[in-house]
Amino acid sequence: MGNILKCFRGDEEEDHYPYYHPGSRPHYPQQQQQQQADGHGVASLAHDLLNFESASMVPEGLKQHVTASKKAQIKWYQNMLEAYKNARTPPRTPEEAAQLVVSALNWIQRADLEGILEFYNFPIPSLPAASSNHRPSSLPEGVQFVLNTLPVHNQNIGDGDGFTAYVATTDPRESGNVPIEVHEMVIARTEARNRRDYKSADALQSRLKEAGYR
């Protein structure tokens, strides 16, 4: 979350993020002040992504602009958060932010994608057709799914010639193939651990293992 934190922290030596200066009140141009007050704009997107990472919550007002369920919205913000974290620099203009949103969510329904852009008061660029990267429409006979990532962690390499590998569900190409129920269990387990409700967290972990996930 370095990019998002920098967006709010600012950098005295190379201040590409004029939204906040430590020890002072935020300095917004007049247009940005209006966007922030209305709950829209580049800074609001960064704030919502930071809030989603810490609390797994999506903006309440978004439901007025899209028709998809809250479950689907959670998956959208997972993808946007990952795209934001992987960006070389955080978007600084509405146009840059719109491109980031489109690239992260080009597989969802066009009406919902336009609704997200309208919610943040971003321009609606020429939207590409839905990408097949997330849900392949056709695969060779006998192939059930495609692995785009296969990370191996040191602690999962034991003595001998065996190891355990997993797909990286932080990658939008993989997360789109994970059932929404699994995403919800992961979020619920994280919340339980934050509350130190380890009994519930362990129970959710057992359910994840039964479903074939960790």
Image (spheres, helix red, strand yellow):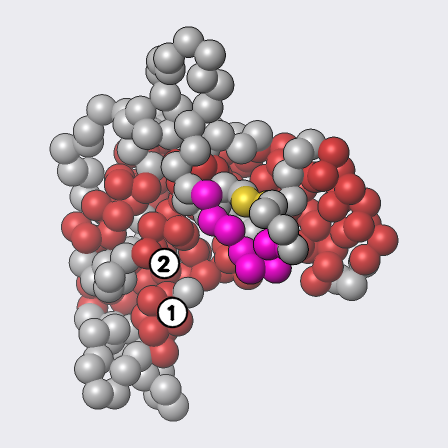
Q: Which mark is residue 2?
A: 1
Extreme-top residue of the structure: 141
On the rendered image, what quadrant is the C terminus found in? top right
- Residue 89 image offset from top left, x and y in percent: 24, 64
Quarter where residue 117 is shown:
top left
Residue beneath the point at 37% across and 66% down:
4
Q: Please name whichever residue, 54 or 86, is drawn nearer the observer in this view of the structure.
A: 86
Can residue 38 be seen at all in this image of the molecule? no
Q: Which residues are magenta?
A: 150-158
Main secondary structure of the magenta stretch: strand
Q: Residue 109, located in which quarter of the rendered image? A: top left
Task: Name the residue rendered at 59%, 40% in the picture.
Answer: 183
Residue 154: quadrant of the picture: bottom right
- Which residue is depicted at the point 14% across and 33% down? 126
Single out the residue that lies furthest toward the bottom.
Answer: 23
Relative to 43, 99 lies left or right: left
SS label for mark 1: helix
